[in-house]
Image (cartoon, helix red, strand yellow):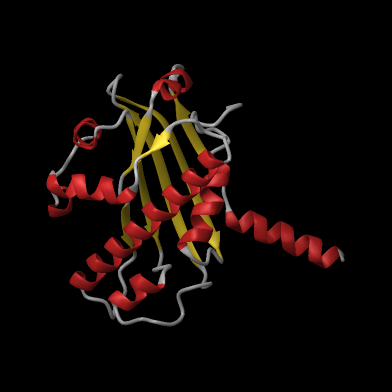
Amino acid sequence: MKKSIVLLIVVASLLQSCAKIFYTPDARSLAQDQSIIAIVPPKVSIAARRNVDGTALIEQQRAESLNFQREMYNWMLKRKMQGNITVDIQDVETTNALLAKAGFREGIALTPDEMSRFLGVDGILTSNFSLSKPMSEAAAIAVGIIGGTTGATNEATVSLSIHDFASKKMIWNYDQQLSSSLGTPARLVDDLMRQASRKMPYFSGN
């Protein structure tokens, strides 16, 4: 029994490190004034592998970006349906279609202000994921690696930011490092968002 408790403590310590949180004094009031937000595709970087060329790595990162975006959207939408947040969330198909028209997928740099204007939203959630290896089957297939990703030891450094269109500024930022057996994108996002939401200004009681 004691060994099991010790093991659980070790696993918990591996799964997360201390998060760094920034928010402006008016973050909550600005967030509460927003009617609709968008979750833009995350910037994803995956450590290079010797057997993966540059083109395949780019496709791999794009696949993971869409996976993480979808999982964050699903997570936030579920909490909205539960009544934990009131802000509406733009569906990701609309978000990505509008960003594509603005040249986002072609590598044109867009500021948070520009993205908010193109998307017609009051705020956006941006994010960065730095991974030591791919996490999803879709990303693995992109480079011909079907096995050995899900459930494998991985490390991720993640940064989430909320940008408010009305004030033209970033009002909240959350940085976290996760490691050990993160499993799928859904598992990583669930672990991440459960922790981040405790300080996210969209959630009541924060």
Residue displayed at 46% across by 30% down: 22
Q: Position of residue 122 (x, y in %)?
A: 32, 28
Q: Nearer the viewer, residue 69 or 188?
A: 69
Q: Is residue 122 above or below residue 38?
A: above
**Residue 167 horizontal side relative to residue 76, left or right:** left
Q: Position of residue 129 (x, y in %)?
A: 38, 53
Q: Of all residues shown, which one is farthest toward the front? A: 81
Is residue 19 something one can see in this rendering?
no
Q: Is residue 72 above or below residue 203?
A: below
Q: Which quadrant of the structure image shows residue 59?
A: bottom left
Quarter of the figure with the C terminus: top right
**Residue 40 horizontal side relative to residue 192, left or right:** left
Q: Which quadrant of the structure image shows residue 164?
A: top left
Q: Is residue 153 above or below residue 73?
A: below
Quarter of the figure with the N terminus: bottom right
Residue displayed at 36% across by 75% down: 140
Q: Position of residue 88 (x, y in %)?
A: 41, 35
